Amino acid sequence: MSVTIVQSRFGLYGLILFACLLGFCARGASAQENNSHAPDNQKWNYDEIKKTPEKARGRQNPLENDPDAMLAGGKLFQRDCAECHGLKAEGGKRAPSLLSEEVQQATPGSLFWVLTNGVVWHGMPDWSKLPEPQRWQIVTFLKLFKASATPGRSGGG
């Protein structure tokens, strides 16, 4: 996606917002490497991702390469997710990091399934009342962190 496409579709405001979101993702990837929240996040397990039914796991994100979805997903994340998962998705005492390898390696369908069904017994509400396109927008936004991560980074301590 070129800057020209973004600028023509969104104007100057959209270009600035897009640049901010990309910067947000870059900071998130950096925060993953320098994870100062590691002790808090070590208590979280990501078993719900592993429990995703096969049919759901295989679902493809229909908005995967849509720049509108990336921007909208960032806004939705800030509105609905950042309170628990942190402004940079780094996690904290109320919810796990979304920068973890488990989340970033998950299929879009798995993330959509967890978002739709929640992990209620661990405090994450189900977001099934959020319209399906908005849930896919959040998944699109979360996958930006993977695209921004440092290539070749291993999951060691």
Image (cartoon, rainbow, N blue to C red):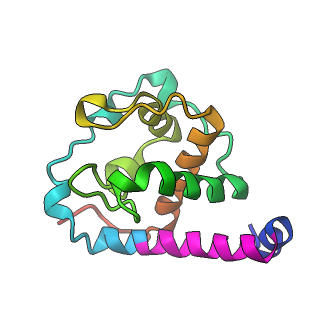
Residue nearest the viewer, comparing 56 with 89: 89
The quarter holding residue 1 reads bottom right
Q: Between 35 and 85, which is closer to the camera in this rendering?
A: 85
**Where in the figure is residue 62, as x and y percent of width and height?**
68, 39
**Which residue is rendered at x = 13% and y = 61% of the image?**
39
Magenta residues span: 11-27
Q: Position of residue 36 (x, y in %)?
A: 21, 71
The magenta stretch spans residue 18: yes
Q: Decide whether the magenta segment is chiefly helix, strand or loop.
A: helix
Q: Is residue 53 above or below residue 43?
A: above
Between 44 and 59, the one lying in front of the other is 44
Residue lying furthest right:
8
Quarter occupied by residue 9: bottom right
* Residue 44 placement, left or right of 52: left
Q: Is residue 1 above or below residue 137?
A: below
**Residue 92 x/y as whole percent:** 25, 58
**Count of labels in the image:** 0
The residue positioned 65% from the left and 70% from the top of the image is 18
Residue 102 percent location from the top left of the image: 33, 48
Q: Is residue 36 visible?
A: yes
